[in-house]
Image: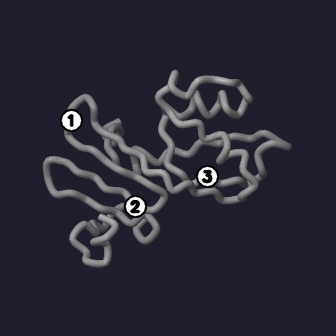
């Protein structure tokens, strides 16, 4: 429990498994970052329920789950914050993660460093991305 509520892989990268023969392609992998608030709108979308997206906080990811691509990566950027203690904020997309806290900012290239061990914030190669 000590590592929950922080913006790093050990806390935030939790897999979700869905099976729906004939609807969701076997071995389908969605690499897009989603959050727990996305579950309800996504499940409603998968069930074909017509709903007003303004009624829910999350994003409906059903189109991505049902797409014919075997590996799907949406280029959306998600923003997270420690709303209770206000110690950090993070922006995450399919490849990069930026974490800003009271200390040094951290920038991860999750393709090259999936364990989030290297801070690329001051690396000149990432100047345009940061």
> Residue at coordinates 28% horizontally, 36% vertically from top-left?
82
Q: Is label 2 in contact with label 1 (beta carbons under 8 Å)?
A: no
Picture quadrant of residue 107 = bottom left
Dot 3 corresponds to which residue?
Answer: 30
Q: Judge left or right: residue 104 versus residue 49.
A: left
Which residue is label 2 attached to? 96
Image x and y of residue 88, in percent = 24, 43
Mark sitting earlier along the chain (2/1):
1
Crowdedness of circle 3 by 10 Å Cα count: few (<14), some, many (20+)?
many
Residue 84: x, y in percent? 25, 29
From the viewer's side, name the closer residue of 86 and 3: 86
Please say if 32 is above or below 113: above
Q: Residue at x 53, y 34 (%)?
A: 38
Secondary structure at numbered mark 3: strand
Give the structural element (helix, strand or loop) at label 1: loop
Whether 52 is drawn above or below 106: the answer is: above
Residue 115's quadrant in the figure? bottom left
Q: Position of residue 123 (x, y in %)?
A: 25, 75
Name, please, the residue furthest toward the right. 22
What label does residue 86 carry, if any?
1
């Amino acid at each position: 429990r000590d590592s929950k509520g922080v913006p790093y892989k050990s806390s935030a990268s939790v897999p979700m498994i869905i099976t729906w023969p004939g609807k969701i392609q076997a071995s389908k992998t969605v690499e897009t970052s989603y959050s727990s608030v996305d579950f309800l709108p996504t499940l409603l979308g998968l069930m074909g329920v017509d709903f007003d997206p303004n009624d829910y906080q999350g994003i409906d990811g059903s189109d991505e789950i049902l797409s014919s691509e075997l590996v799907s990566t949406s280029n959306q950027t998600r923003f997270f914050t420690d709303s209770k203690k206000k110690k950090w904020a993070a922006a995450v997309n399919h490849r990069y993660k930026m974490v800003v806290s009271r200390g040094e900012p951290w920038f991860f290239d999750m393709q090259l460093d999936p364990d989030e061990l290297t801070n690329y914030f001051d690396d000149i190669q990432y100047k345009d991305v940061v």
